[in-house]
Each structure stands twice: as C-alpha cells, then as structure tokens.
C-alpha cells in the first residue's frame, strides 16, 4: 500500500503530544492503513506501543468498556511514553472516558472511527482543547496513479469517473469482482450500519431516500424537494424524517453538503444546499445498463479533489446563474465552473456565461474533459486530466 503522506504529514507534528489524535472518515477509505503507517514510523524509535482493533472480535469481546480498556493498557504498557493505537474505538462503551483518562498518564493516543459522532458536540465539549482531528477520504486520482503503479496496473481517468477511489477495489482484476466489492461495501456502510445503529423502522423509506440522494449527487436539493419525490412511493413521510435521515448519511461521511452563497445578499442561503457523494461509486452502482452519470460524477470528482487540496468550497449564486464552486484558500479565491464538455456551442455559451458580472479580482476557471484548450482572455480552461495531477489551482 502506498504511503499516504498527505495525511501523515498532518499528524506527524503531534506524535509526542498528549492531545488525542482522531483519524476519521468513511469506512474503508484507508484510515487503518494510515494508522499502521504512523505506528510503523513511531516504531522505528520505540517498542512501547499498544495496538487494538475493535472490529476484531477477540478484542471487542474482551475489552467491552472504558474500565477494561484502561486496565488492559496499564497491564501491558512499558515504562516511559507509550503510544496507543485504537482502531474503530467508538465500538466500545465509554471510550470517551477511557481516552480522557489515558492521555493523562504519559500516553500518546491515536484513534480511528467511521462515525462523525467522534466529533459530536457532546464529545468535543468534554475534550475541549484536548484533541486534534484529521479527516481521511478515499483515493484522489494522484493516489490512484501511485497505487496502480505499485500494483502494475493502468490508472484510467474514465474508470475514476465511474468507480471512484475506494482503495481496496484496485486490488481486484476483473470489473465483476470490483463491482461485487463495491456493492457489498455499499450494503455495509450505507444501509446495514445505519439501519442497525439508528434502529430505523421505516427501512423501505430509508432505502428509497438513500437511493434518491446518492443518484442525485452534485445537485442542489432541499428537504422539501426530496420529500416530494419520496411521497410518491411512501405516505407519511415528513420533512423532519427526511432531514434526520440526511444527517445519518452525513454522520457516516457518506455524503457532504455545501451551502449556496448569494452574490446579491452577500451571505449564505441556508435553505438550499448541494449534496456530494463521498465517492462516485455510490452513484454508479445504482445506474442501469451502464448508463453512468459522468456529467455529475465529474463535478463530484472535482469537489473531492478541491477539498483534498485544502480549499473551502461554496456554491455561488451569480444573480440567478449558478457557478459550481467558489474555492477559497488563504487569501486566494477562485470561481470554478465544471462541465463534461464545452465542445458544442450551446454548452460553451451556457458555461462561460455563468461568469458574467463576477468580480475581476478572482480567477475564473472552467474544468472539462475536453482535450482542446478553450481558455479565453478572461477564463482559464483546465483539462480534467491536467487538473487531476495538480496540487493547487
């Protein structure tokens, strides 16, 4: 497996700190591998390391609560600073209390989890100023290229647009095996985990909502518009229920939403948001007859890549015309429009006209899958295959 230095370099300054290092993100995005790489790096200088994986029944069946976890560490640690690595720690009762206690006794604590409850308001209040959090995502294209080279395979942009970047899938040689893996992954993290965790009784309604949202990535949605679709099949579906289910998906890092920024009012519009899938495979496995939604997947990919690069992202309402993103980092701001192609005149006019009346202080960028350079004196065109290899805009 490749060294995911993008994430490790963020954690490295805290190796010796008593702050709890929280590595979080969607299931199977590579958190455990990153933890192992950190553990191996620290292990070059010490053997005072304890690793526990709470998805392993041998561990979770014997260490069931905070008291037992603290006792296990005290019985097995050596003198001096001890480095504790707990994988999927949220699976045991009272893990917060155990973490708060263990950090006080010359331990450097690293934990992973697939649930944003790790960063819930209650927990962060208890740990105010005592933790640092690091969000891990599925592979971006640069990581896919590196991993495929390690495996002796070709990295295809089109394959990325359809099947995304969950690391494990690249180990399978056939498309059938990859598809089976991704469908099983979807069943586990999107449906089974959430239905069981939240004791969802309206399972059919929940599945319909999940399918609708994940098929409609890169679109502006409201709770009302989602309900209008769902009530065609399910009666008694309230906006509150819709909003609750959406929060479940966000909580498990399956989707993210970004606010719309209005040029007219100079503020965020809270009643609409644009939803993106954590990985475009969630859209593609729901498509029939290989009719993949490459247009919206491309925008979703650009969103994921921009977030990986460290940009703060908003949708921009430019006087009624949508610009896909305002991307902000430090003092620089970019208007970014995304389209599959602008080769046809109608598409060219539609996409480029979105930039009219925007300020001239921010660079205007359009990203497409075209090979021809359509840059103008005002708008910079970036070909997708070039964008995917960039470190910043």
Image (cartoon, rainbow, N blue to C red):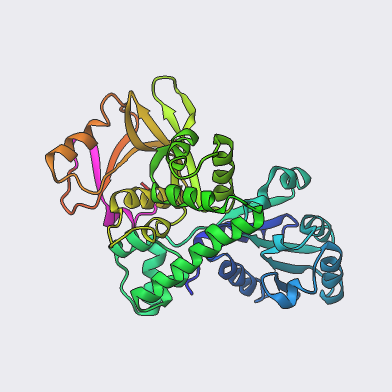
Q: Nearer the viewer, residue 294 or 45?
A: 294
Residue 51 horizontal/vertical position (percent): 71, 73
Asked whether 11 falls inside the magenta stretch, the response is no
State the count of labels.
Answer: 0
Q: Is residue 384 magenta?
A: yes
Q: In the figure, residue 68 lies in which quadrant?
A: bottom right
User: For this view, does 106 lie left or right of residue 214?
Assistant: right
Q: Is residue 117 left or right of residue 230?
A: right
| Residue at 60 percent of width and 56 percent of height | 195
Could you tell me residue 324's position as x and y percent?
A: 35, 38
Query: Residue at left 25%, top 41%?
Result: 380
Residue 238 percent across, percent down from the top left: 55, 36
Q: In the current view of this chain or complex, which residue is farthest to the left?
A: 345
**For the magenta stretch, what is the residue range?**
375-391
Q: Residue at x 68, y 75 (%)?
A: 56
Quarter occupied by residue 61: bottom right
Q: Please tell me which residue lies in front, 183 or 320.
A: 183
Report the residue at 37% width, 63% height from top: 163
Question: Where in the figure is residue 330, as x and y percent of width and height?
Answer: 48, 39
Residue 276 higher or lower than 138, as above or below: above
Place residue 58 in its image quadrant: bottom right
Q: Nearer the viewer, residue 222 or 132?
A: 222
Left-right relation of 192 to 59: left
Residue 260 vs 135, above or below: the answer is above
Q: Is residue 133 visible?
A: yes
Residue 46 seen anywhere in this rendered image of the structure: no
């Amino acid at each position: 497996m490749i060294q995911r230095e993008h994430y490790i370099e963020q954690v490295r300054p805290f190796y010796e700190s008593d702050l709890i290092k929280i590595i979080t993100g969607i299931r199977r995005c590579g958190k455990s591998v990153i933890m192992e790489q950190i553990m191996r790096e620290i292990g070059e200088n010490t053997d005072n390391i304890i690793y526990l994986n709470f998805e392993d029944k041998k561990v979770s069946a014997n260490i069931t609560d905070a008291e037992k976890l603290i006792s296990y560490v005290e019985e097995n640690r050596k003198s001096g600073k001890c480095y504790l690595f707990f994988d999927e720690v949220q699976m045991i009762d009272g893990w917060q209390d155990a973490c708060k206690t263990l950090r006080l006794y010359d331990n450097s604590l690293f934990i992973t989890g697939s649930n944003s409850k790790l960063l819930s308001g209650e927990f962060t209040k208890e740990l105010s100023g005592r933790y640092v959090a690091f969000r891990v995502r599925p592979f971006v294209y640069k990581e896919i290229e590196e991993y495929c080279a390690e495996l002796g395979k070709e990295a295809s942009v089109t394959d990325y647009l359809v099947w995304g970047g969950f690391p494990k899938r690249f180990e399978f040689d056939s498309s059938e095996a990859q598809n089976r893996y991704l469908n099983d992954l979807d069943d586990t993290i999107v449906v089974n985990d959430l239905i069981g965790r939240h004791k969802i009784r309206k399972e059919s309604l929940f599945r319909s909502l999940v399918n609708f949202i994940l098929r409609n990535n890169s679109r502006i949605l409201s709770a009302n518009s989602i309900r209008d679709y769902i009530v065609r099949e399910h009666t008694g579906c309230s906006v509150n229920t819709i909003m609750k289910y959406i929060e479940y998906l966000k909580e498990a890092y399956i989707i993210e939403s970004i606010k719309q920024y209005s040029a007219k009012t100079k503020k965020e519009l809270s009643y609409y948001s644009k939803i993106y899938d954590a990985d475009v495979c969630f859209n593609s496995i729901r498509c029939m007859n290989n009719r993949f939604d490459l247009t919206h997947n491309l925008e979703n990919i650009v969103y994921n890549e921009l977030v990986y690069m460290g940009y703060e992202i908003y949708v921009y309402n430019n006087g009624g015309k949508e610009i896909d993103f305002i991307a902000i980092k430090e003092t620089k701001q970019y208007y970014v429009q995304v389209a599959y192609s602008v080769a046809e005149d109608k598409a060219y006019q539609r996409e480029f006209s979105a930039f009219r009346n925007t300020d001239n202080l921010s660079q205007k960028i359009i990203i497409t899958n075209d090979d021809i350079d359509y840059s103008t004196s005002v708008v910079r065109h970036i070909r997708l295959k070039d964008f995917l290899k960039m470190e910043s805009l």
